[in-house]
Amino acid sequence: MIAFEDVEIAQRRLAPFVHRTPVMTSHSLDEWLDTNAFLKCEHLQRCGAFKYRGATNAVQSLAPNVAARGVAAHSSGNHGAALALAARTRGIPAHIVVPRTATRTKRDAIAAYGAHVVLCEPTLAAREAGVAAVIAETGAVEIHPFDHDDVIAGAGTAALELVDDVPGLDIVIAPVGGGGLLSGTAIAAHGRRPELRVIGAEPAAADDAARSLQGGAIVPPDPPATIADGLLTGLSARTFAVLSEHVETIVTVSEAEIVAAMDVVWQRTKQLIEPSAAVAVAAVREGDYAGARVGIILSGGNADLALAAG
């Protein structure tokens, strides 16, 4: 398990590369949520998502001879785009295996950042097989979207900034798919302030992380059917261990609640967030956090407007 010191090291390493994203508040949104919300705007991060932090931390940590071989990953979109840009920044190749069902917005972003895109079927087995084939062919090193210490530590720097920028938070909440963001968030929050409550947010239609924590063992995900396309993967042993130690609970929300949260954030703050980020906002409304000071990690803003219009 990574330590809080790893997050602090990552913060120093990332300083030349990432935005220190703003924290936004809205009285109108507070009324809707019945709480005091502090929005950590990672949708305004480079690549439009927190993923750039973890990808950059991992890429910048590679020894020169290893980095020269290039990097590879499977991704539904945000990690792929982040890794592509992180690789381009360091001047090395990137190969991204992308499920054919990934949104066009995210697929186009990966290609625009210069990565070689390989399409695959939308299953974990197909994604992993695709990465294995790329590595065998190119010698690239895999940078996993969440099951990677440097990626988790980099992701945790968003929460570290949030806790430092907003004194007196009671709760920090982040969405969970594979668990990289929530793991980094938990380690950073508890490293800085052990008394903070750390809570996860997950679609009810893809609630394997909630069921895993409730049952005390990893539950493989069922075929997911959620608009929150960034939260489709299951936990790894690495992220499950962190969440089991640090996370109080995982709140699940319906598809209608996700869409409503995305719409309300737009209406009240004029910020466009993607459904995966809206999951965390919806979870605050569904939870019992009246009057609390709640930090919410808005994980990304790469929404597919054509999908939303449909």
Image: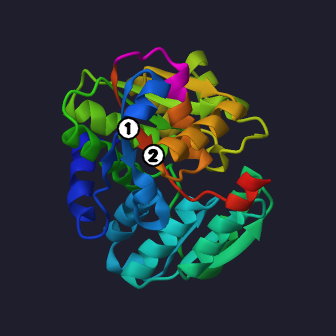
Image-quadrant location for residue 177? top right
Nearer-the-camera pick, 277 or 153: 277
| Magenta residues, start to end | 283-291
Sequence order check: which comes first, mark 1 or mark 2?
A: 1
Residue 24 place in picture, x, y as percent: 34, 45
Q: Secondary structure beneath disc 1?
A: loop
Residue 206 place in picture, x, y as percent: 69, 34
Nearer-the-camera pick, 7 or 148: 7
Q: Residue sitting at 34 percent across and 39 percent down?
A: 25
> Marks 1 and 2: CB-CB under 8 Å?
yes
Residue 148 place in picture, x, y as percent: 45, 52
- As drawn, the label of residue 274 is none
- Does residue 135 appear anywhere in the picture? no
- Does residue 43 appear anywhere in the picture? yes
The residue wearing badge 1 is 26
The residue wearing badge 2 is 269
Identify which amino acid the numbered label 1 is placed on: Ser
Q: Residue sitting at 77 percent across and 52 percent down?
A: 123
Q: Is residue 286 magenta?
A: yes
In the picture, measured across the screen, residue 71 lies left or right of residue 198, that is right
CA gap, disc 1 to disc 2? 7 Å
**In the image, residue 125 above or below residue 168:** below
Identify which amino acid the numbered label 2 is placed on: Thr
Q: Secondary structure beneath disc 2?
A: helix
Q: Is residue 270 magenta?
A: no
**In the image, residue 6 above or below residue 129:** above
